[in-house]
Structures are given as C-alpha cells and as structure tokens.
Amino acid sequence: MFHTVSLAVTLAVTWLLLSGYYTPLILGLGAGSIILVVLVVHRMDAADHETHPIHMVGKAFTYFPWLMLEIVKANFDVARAILQRDMPIETKVLRVDGSQRTDVGIVAYANSITLTPGTVTILDNGHSLDVHSLTPVAAEGLLSGEMDKRVTELEAAGAWEDGDGE
C-alpha cells in the first residue's frame, strides 16, 4: 500500500510541476488521470520496490551530485583526448563486476556508466557488465570500483527488511 500511495503522490507532484496550469478543469483532469493510473497499477500489482523505488530517494540526493561531477570530469578527459595532437585514445572492452543485488541496481549501474562520457555499457551479463571505454583514464575509473560501490549504496538505501516494503 505504501508504494501505491507514494506513486500517487509522485505522479501528482510531477504533474503539477510540469503542467503549469491550475484551472479547475485541468486540475480535475489531472486528478482523474492520476487516479486511473494508480488504480491500473494497483490492479496489476505492479507497485513495488522495483517498479517504484521510492526507498532510493534519500540516497539519490548524494549520489546524483557525485554522478554529475564524474560526468563533468569525464567530459574534460574525452575533450582532452580528442584535442591533443597525438590523440591518446586507447579503446578497450572491459568486463566489470557489479555488486548490485536487484535489477534496479544493475540498471542504475549500467546507465551511470553509459551517462559518463568515454564509457558505454554494451552488454549485461547478470552481475557483470561489458563496457567499452575510450581512454585509459575512463578504464581506470571503472576498474577502481568507486561507481559500483556508490550504486550499491544507492540500491541498499532504505531497503525493506521483508523485501517487498508492504
């Protein structure tokens, strides 16, 4: 029930922020849409900790700024590699192990790697990922395990004791 209510609140807040219109008709249509979506999701029994990972929100406030900083640093690395006369580009395909336990954690790890310039996740092997890296600095960053550790902390943040959060 918690995930259903949090889904409704999340949808309402998102809709209000993105809409920008607050007339009675528009508010009524928005409320009706949210109620319909929440009823369908509840009927499908699809509101759980995997499809609506509300438990990750608290840790996300520290994870996303760190990720943004890593993206900026990787942008400078890629720009430097491209602009240097000798172009120190050494592409590699690496297999990095992930310590995430859920699909949400693995997807967050793979997407975080792909969002970082100079690296692209090309294959998910369960708990390891095949990643293409453009520069040695990008490869070293992946092999250091810092991103894996941080995504695992994000995944575990507020995890439910009984596994389903209900």
Image: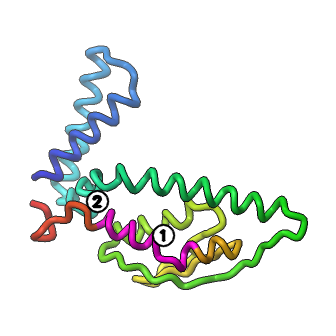
Q: Nearer the viewer, residue 103 or 37?
A: 103
Please tell me whether residue 150 belongs to the stretch shown in magenta: yes
Which residue occupies the foreground of this view, 14 or 138?
138
Q: Main secondary structure of the magenta part?
A: helix
Tell me the element at label 1: helix
Q: Which residues are magenta?
A: 141-155
Q: Determine if the magenta segment contains residue 94.
A: no
Residue type at mark 1 is Ala
Q: Residue at x 65, y 74 (%)?
A: 133
Q: Secondary structure at mark 2?
A: loop
Gap in angstroms between the C-alphas marked 1 and 2: 17 Å
Q: Which mark is residue 51?
A: 2
Question: Looking at the image, what colour scheme do you see?
Answer: rainbow
Q: Residue 162's spot in the image, x, y percent? A: 10, 70
**Amino acid type of the residue that numbered disc 2 sits on in the rendered structure:** Thr
Q: Position of residue 15 (x, y in %)?
A: 34, 33
Label located before the other in sequence (1 or 2): 2
Apparent side of residue 19 relative to residue 90 in the rendered image (left or right): left
Residue at far top of view: 23
Residue 112 locus on image (x, y percent): 49, 63
| Side of 125 where 117 appears, left or right | right
Q: Which mark is residue 110?
A: 1
- Give the camera-side residue of 120 and 153: 153
22 versus 149 height, above or below: above
Residue 29 circle label: none
Q: Quadrant of residue 52?
A: bottom left
- Residue 16: image location, x then y, percent: 32, 28
Q: Residue at x 37, y 19 (%)?
A: 21
